[in-house]
Amino acid sequence: MQIPVLVEHLKGNGYRARGKEPFAVSAKGATREEALAKLRAKIQARLKNGTEVVGLEIGPEPDPWMELAGMFRDDPWLGDWKRSIEEYRQKIDDDPDAL
């Protein structure tokens, strides 16, 4: 996992490395590498004991009926049913009094 880290040179002596939320911690060191190593150690300490960083998808809920879409696609009765509807409609179109 990579996170953005700001590394600042401190006036006079050393460096400071800072992360953003959820790792809003900072660490100082005499060198850039030492500051980063200390920051890494602090972050790793927060991730112990089952703590985790996860992404959360936010948006509209999926339509629960979409699971059923196409469920009759390969059903052999579907063709017969469609033909029956077409025949009935044709019959009604030909003779409106047939109802």
Image (tube, rainbow, N blue to C red):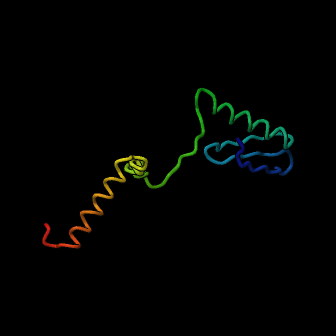
* Residue 79 screen position, x and y as percent: 36, 53
> In terms of depth relative to the viewer, which is nearer, 71 or 21?
71
The percent position of residue 39, horizontal first and vertical second, equals: 74, 38
Residue 17: give x, y in percent of width and height.
Answer: 76, 45
Nearest the eye: 74 or 50: 74
- Can you say whether 58 is above or below 42 in the image? below
Which quarter of the rendered picture does the C terminus lie within?
bottom left
> Which residue lies at the image location 67% right of the left edge and 30% below the top edge?
45
- Judge left or right: residue 89 versus residue 49: left
Horizontal side of 93 relative to 24 (left or right) equals: left
Q: Is residue 27 above or below residue 62?
A: above
Image quadrant containing the N terminus: top right
Task: Find residue 36 and report its image quarter.
Answer: top right
Which one is nearer the viewer's eye here, 4 or 68? 68
| Image position of 48 with respect to 39: above or below | above
x and y percentages locating residue 86 in the rendered image: 30, 63
Q: Nearer the viewer, residue 21 or 91?
A: 91
